[in-house]
């Protein structure tokens, strides 16, 4: 759902899909990087809000995990988005209560309501909860470690082609089915609760009969053969201490933990949240049963805390998880304990490895910049990591030179340098983007001599001509049709030059440059020389230049852990 | 409470109070700006968490309102702080339930529990709620406007001396007392509820008898003569539609609204939150009674929504208010409506003026930088606002020159320029802070000639010698005792120079420079020349140079609203 929300937002940000005739003209306002990034953040927030019915949790999730660059305007926008989601959701729930939605419409705004439970707890309870948090953190980081290994294996398999992908999916499916229908045979039958409202049948209800005779139910089957949602609800349910036996909980936990690890990453839409909550709830209930002699806390609440500890151990979020759990369970009185568990499990897990989202981002090879600078960056200056060769343009440049540079390099930004006779000394005019160059060349505003004709060029274009196109829809070099004669002509780059690029002096500490780059969300940063009498630019820094792989490749003696 | 928390944190950040022998040696780690700022943010979060028993709300309050500069590490730290607050609070509540705390210990973790209310609502209800939000936003912005005017008046009165301060406090006290005991006489008596658990007496209980005969109560007195907490609880209480008459609500609302405005800013510790919630709850209940014919929503819920609309209209926070209200009332099912009301009231109020905290910050004359750049900044370059005269030092400078500069200017940062013969051309070495200069001069590491002796100087000092001292405890110029002979000697500034200051080119757009300054939380920014052959620094930008008053003073033709 989070992914879906972000994808829809991304699609809208690209002005809709031209292929499927889903374009609106007002979407053109999103044709720049910043608004598009904000829109995707809002989409992710809306996804969480809808999936967990947790609007505030959605806002916090987007801010804590999704947004790498935070502004107060963004807070307000995500809040607006999730408020709309909440109201629409509420309207549909209201409508579905009337029974017009068929199978849908059972649930309310709270997915797993545990608010009826009592909430007194004492010293031994807190000790048990601390233990739960520590072990949950260890299991969580182990989960991350195994998911990482499995994903690496899967990416090798998936690369071999569609046939292998399908084979992998089928294998996992068969394995899951075997677990679901095979393992319950190991469990013994338990007499049905005496409550007349409860029936034990395999077709419907929470208590699955499976192989048992009438009036009995199989607790392991009740966990496996329900939907995930119902299984979580069963595990969270309070005042039902003996509904599941310890051995069944243990088998279910082991199975779900392993299945969760091997399912993520195959070619089916699957998430991380629900499997982790399920495994965590099972683990928590197990601990609750084991500690029943020393702790008076309900096993259902233990299940909730177990889910919190697993989520803290894998996702490593704090505030947003806390609010999402709050909104899932409606149990505000348990808040201090949930906060405690999250703190403990996150701290424990942070000793071992990184959060699961960070791991996936790294695995996918996305150039994600950490919010803080690495320690070894302090020993380097900005000029040390500039990757050459540097291609610069004059303020009024020959078309042929531009075409050559665009063709031979993959750079997205080129520094523009004003040179005599137009200025006294050669100086940095600014930076020009590849996409803007392409638009300018397409318009063919060329002149035979090196003359300023900026005003004339500006009149020819509207501001939206230079707006960022959707991914894969921008102009390409092959679209240009420049004739041989035009190659010798000149074009004035001043109108499309960003005259205020962010610059750093070449001796600036790399750590400080990285913080500047990251905090302002830049794409290019100019490195200028310190002493005079040298060319006015030393190089351009892009995101790739700040990646640990690049820096450590240049300076292998620097250890990332120093 | 928020202020108290922040003050304690600030005190800790300054290494405790030496005056009262409250110092700890481990507090020295907070002797730098960044950690101190974080600590104060955590203190404010802890204050909110304790005051409203809302730990998550505290984190969000700190992030949305208190912290001007946000990092993910800060999120984690504030979360830790409020988690500790929540657990300690919970322990005390548990302890107090045993009855060992005397008058304390009545409340639970939820201050105003309304969770028992039903939560279905339909079209007309939403219309009523929208109306509530719009009018609440207008009232909220009016509140801000009046508070601003009143504070301006009070600051004039308070400046006249302690006698006037006390007189003002006494006047407001008398006025409040007159309202509390005078206005209830206008209200008629109402028969006591038939519930035998309820007694109507003036001494105790929610229903105050006041002037009425036995078996009757005065509803206006019940509001005025209860504590604020109990009054809010009464207003929020559900299924008690006719407890208060419309006229009583109206009188109470008008009185509390006006008293709240004139009470803030007098020399007693008072807050904004509780008066606003009280007035808002009363307003909401009033609207609920007026709309009783078309809306089936409970008047207690209307009171809650009214409080939300007032808070949104004055404080202009969204997510944090939402969570604080959630944690105050434990009513998750009302979340969509609360979000709607907050959205509407904030949007409406934003049309008129700024949030009350922004207004107070501006009134106090604190140089607070907006997160976004003002539109008129786009028309200026960084060099346009540099305020002179610029005082620079050589890399190895004469002591007399430094003393003169420190004495005649109030600057806190001085650029250091390396000049021939030490370098080929004069170039910017970095920036040196006043406080560090004082420490260096105190140590008297002088030499008779212009020689590099950086290593020797570094050995003389420990890193903590340069740590930031508590406010008012730093070294002063008068503490230095430089003799006439030493004035002619030289000191090497290189060891204490920050060699990687953030710089901008003089032609950089001021808007971009402001964003850089704000996002990185800088104190000084160097402006360097664009063309070569000029002195290596144009000027230093500080926070004051970005203030609208400064810029518009220099360029009066620029309108702030353009």
Image (tube, coloured by chain):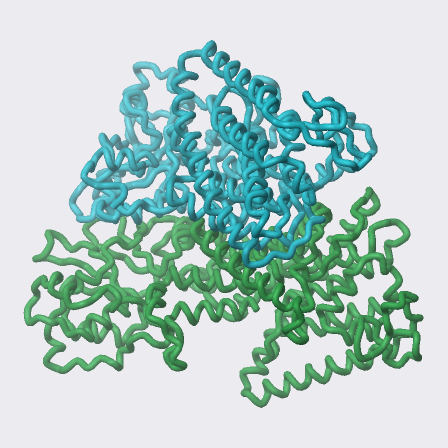
Chain colours: A green, B cyan
Look at 31% across and 60% down and name the residue there. A540
Q: Position of residue B304 (x, y in %)?
A: 60, 43
Of residues A380 and A489, the one nearer the viewer is A489
Q: Quadrant of the N terminus of chain A?
A: bottom right
Q: Residue at left 25%, top 63%? A: A432
What is the x, y in percent for residue B54?
63, 42
Kindly give the residue lying farthest to the top in the view shown: B163
A270 w.r.t. B559: above or below: below
Q: Is residue A246 visible?
A: no
Instruction: Name the residue rendered at 74%, 71% in the picture.
Output: A256
For residue A37, side relative to residue A531 (left or right):
right
Q: Is residue A135 left or right of residue B515?
A: right
Quadrant location of residue A466?
bottom left
| Picture coordinates of residue B352, whole percent (x, y) | 37, 41
- Residue at image position (92%, 66%) is A194
Quarter of the view holding residue A304: bottom right
In the current view of this chain or complex, which residue is farthest to the left?
A449
């Amino acid at each position: 759902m989070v992914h879906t929300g972000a994808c829809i937002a991304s699609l809208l940000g690209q002005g809709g899909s031209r292929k499927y005739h889903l374009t609106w003209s007002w979407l053109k306002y999103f044709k720049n990087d910043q608004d598009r990034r904000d829109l995707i953040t809002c989409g992710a927030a809306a996804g969480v809000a809808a999936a967990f019915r947790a609007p505030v949790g959605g806002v916090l999730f987007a801010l804590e995990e999704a947004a790498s660059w935070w502004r107060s305007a963004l807070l307000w926008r995500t809040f607006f988005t999730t408020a709309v989601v909440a109201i629409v959701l509420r309207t549909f729930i209201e409508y579905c209560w009337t029974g017009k939605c068929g199978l849908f419409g059972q649930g309310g705004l709270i997915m797993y309501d545990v608010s009826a439970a009592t909430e007194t707890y004492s010293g031994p309870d807190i000790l048990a909860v601390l233990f739960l948090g520590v072990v949950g953190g260890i299991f969580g980081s182990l989960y991350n470690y195994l998911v990482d290994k499995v994903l690496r294996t899967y990416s090798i398999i998936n690369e071999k082609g569609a046939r292998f992908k399908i084979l992998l999916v089928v294998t996992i499916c068969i394995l899951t089915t075997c677990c679901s229908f095979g393992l319950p045979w190991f469990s013994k039958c338990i007499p049905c609760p005496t409550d007349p409202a409860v029936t034990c049948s395999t077709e419907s209800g929470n208590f699955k009969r499976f192989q048992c005779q009438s009036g009995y139910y199989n607790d392991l089957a009740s966990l496996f053969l329900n939907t995930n949602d119902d299984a979580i609800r069963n595990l969270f349910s309070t005042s039902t201490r003996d509904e599941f036996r310890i051995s069944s909980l243990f088998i279910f936990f082991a199975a779900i933990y392993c299945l969760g690890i091997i399912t993520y990453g195959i070619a089916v839409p699957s998430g991380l949240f629900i499997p982790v909550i399920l495994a965590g709830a099972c683990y928590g209930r197990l601990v609750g049963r084991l500690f029943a002699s020393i702790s008076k806390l309900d096993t259902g609440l233990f299940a909730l805390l177990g889910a919190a500890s697993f989520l803290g151990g894998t996702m490593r979020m704090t505030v947003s998880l806390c609010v999402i759990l709050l909104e899932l369970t409606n149990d505000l009185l348990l808040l201090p304990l949930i906060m405690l568990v999250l703190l403990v499990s996150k701290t424990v897990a942070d000793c071992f490895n990184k959060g699961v989202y960070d791991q996936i981002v790294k695995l996918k090879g996305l150039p994600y910049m950490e919010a803080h600078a690495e320690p070894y960056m302090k020993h380097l200056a900005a000029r040390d990591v500039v990757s050459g060769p540097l291609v610069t343009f004059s303020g009024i440049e020959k078309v042929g030179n531009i075409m050559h540079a665009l063709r031979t390099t993959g750079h997205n930004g080129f520094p523009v340098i004003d040179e005599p006779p137009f200025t006294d000394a050669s100086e940095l005019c600014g930076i020009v983007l590849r996409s803007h160059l392409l638009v300018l060349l397409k318009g063919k505003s060329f002149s035979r001599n090196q003359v300023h004709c900026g005003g004339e060029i500006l009149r020819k274009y509207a501001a939206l001509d230079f707006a960022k196109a959707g991914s894969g829809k921008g102009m390409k070099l092959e679209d240009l049709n420049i004739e041989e004669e035009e190659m010798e002509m000149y074009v004035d780059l001043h109108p499309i030059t960003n005259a205020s690029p962010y610059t750093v002096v070449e001796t600036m500490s790399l750590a400080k440059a990285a913080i500047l780059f990251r905090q302002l969300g830049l794409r290019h940063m100019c490195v200028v020389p310190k002493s005079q009498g040298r060319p006015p630019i030393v190089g351009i820094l892009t995101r790739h230049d700040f990646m640990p792989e690049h820096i450590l490749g240049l300076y292998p003696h620097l250890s990332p852990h120093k």
